[in-house]
Image: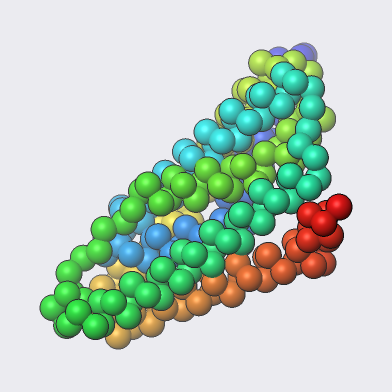
C-alpha cells in the first residue's frame, strides 16, 4: 500500500512539474531564446536545457535543505525571486537589441540564421530553480516521509518540467520558424517577445519589491 501511495505522489509530482513549466515567467523567459531560432528542433531543445537547469538547481538546493531540516528565510527566498525579474528584463532587452543590430548590419545579415544559446536556456532554468527552491522544499516536506522519497519526488517533478517546457517551446517556436522567410513579420514577433519579457520583468520586480514588501525587508 505504501508503494502505491508513493507512486501516486510521484505521478502527481510529474503532473505538477508540467503545470509548473507553463507559468508565465518561465514561458516568457524561454520565448526570448526560442525566438532566435529558424529551426523548430532548436527551439524545442532550448526548452529541454531550461528544464535540465531548473531540475539541477531544485534537486541540489532542495536535498540540502531537506537534509538540514531547514528552509530559506523569507527575505532570501523573495530575493531569489527578484533575480527572475532582473533576468526577464535583461533577456527582453537583448531580444529587442538583436533585431536592431541585425537591421543596422544590413539585409543579408538579417537573413542569416541565428543560433540558439542553450547556455542561456540552462542559465534561465538555474535561476528559476533557485527562485522556486523554497516553495519546492515546503511542498516536498509536506508530501513525503524520507529523504530518498524527497529526492525521487523532486527528480520526477523536474522531469515533468522538462516535458512541459519541451512541449511549449515547440509551440512557441512555430510562428518564428514559419516567419523565417518573412523578415518583417519575424522581426516584429521577436521585438514583441522582447517587449513582453521586459515589461513583465519590471512588473515582477515591482510586485515583489513594493506589493509583497521585499524592499522593506531589505531595509530591516
Along the line of sight, the residue nearer the viewer: 203 or 215: 215
Residue 172 seen: no
Residue 211 falls in which quadrant of the image? bottom right
Residue 55 falls in which quadrant of the image? top right
Query: Could you tell me which residue is drawn at 32 percent across and 80 percent down?
Result: 100
Name the spot of residue 116 as percent of width and height, x first: 31, 56
> Is 73 drawn above or below residue 183 in the view shown?
above
| Outermost residue to the front | 219
Name the spot of residue 16 as percent of width and height, x first: 66, 42
Query: Could you tell me which residue is drawn at 43 percent across and 50 percent down?
Result: 121
Describe residue 92's horizontal placement relative to residue 17 as left or right.
left
| Outermost residue to the bottom | 184
* Scheme by which the image is coloured: rainbow
Describe residue 87's horizontal placement relative to residue 115 as left or right.
right
Along the line of sight, the residue nearer the viewer: 90 or 182: 90
Name the spot of residue 13 as percent of width and height, x first: 66, 35
Residue 168 seen: yes
Along the line of sight, the residue nearer the viewer: 8 or 193: 193
Q: How many numbered marks appear?
A: 0
Query: Could you tell me which residue is drawn at 79 percent across and 22 percent down?
Result: 69
Name the spot of residue 209 as percent of width and height, x first: 76, 63
Describe residue 215's horizontal placement relative to residue 13 as left or right.
right
> Is 151 drawn above or below residue 169 in the view shown?
above
Query: Could you tell me which residue is drawn at 74 percent across and 16 percent down?
Result: 146
Amino acid at each position: 500500500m505504501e508503494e502505491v501511495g508513493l507512486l501516486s505522489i510521484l505521478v502527481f509530482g510529474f503532473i505538477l512539474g508540467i503545470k509548473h513549466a507553463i507559468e508565465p515567467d518561465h514561458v516568457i523567459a524561454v520565448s526570448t531564446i526560442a525566438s532566435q531560432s529558424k529551426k523548430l528542433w532548436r527551439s524545442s531543445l532550448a526548452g529541454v536545457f531550461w528544464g535540465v537547469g531548473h531540475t539541477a538547481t531544485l534537486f541540489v538546493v532542495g536535498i540540502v535543505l531537506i537534509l538540514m531540516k531547514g528552509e530559506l528565510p523569507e527575505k532570501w527566498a523573495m530575493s531569489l525571486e527578484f533575480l527572475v525579474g532582473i533576468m526577464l528584463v535583461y533577456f527582453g532587452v537583448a531580444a529587442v537589441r538583436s533585431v536592431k543590430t541585425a537591421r543596422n548590419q544590413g539585409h543579408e545579415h538579417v537573413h542569416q540564421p541565428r543560433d540558439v544559446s542553450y547556455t542561456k536556456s540552462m542559465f534561465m532554468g538555474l535561476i528559476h530553480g533557485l527562485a522556486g527552491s523554497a516553495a519546492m522544499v515546503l511542498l516536498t516536506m509536506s508530501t513525503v516521509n524520507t529523504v530518498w522519497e524527497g529526492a525521487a519526488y523532486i527528480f520526477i517533478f523536474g522531469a515533468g518540467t522538462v516535458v512541459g517546457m519541451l512541449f511549449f517551446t515547440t509551440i512557441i517556436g512555430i510562428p518564428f520558424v514559419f516567419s523565417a522567410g518573412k523578415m518583417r513579420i519575424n522581426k516584429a514577433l521577436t521585438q514583441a517577445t522582447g517587449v513582453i519579457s521586459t515589461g513583465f520583468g519590471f512588473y515582477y520586480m515591482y510586485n515583489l519589491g513594493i506589493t509583497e514588501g521585499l524592499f522593506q525587508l531589505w531595509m530591516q
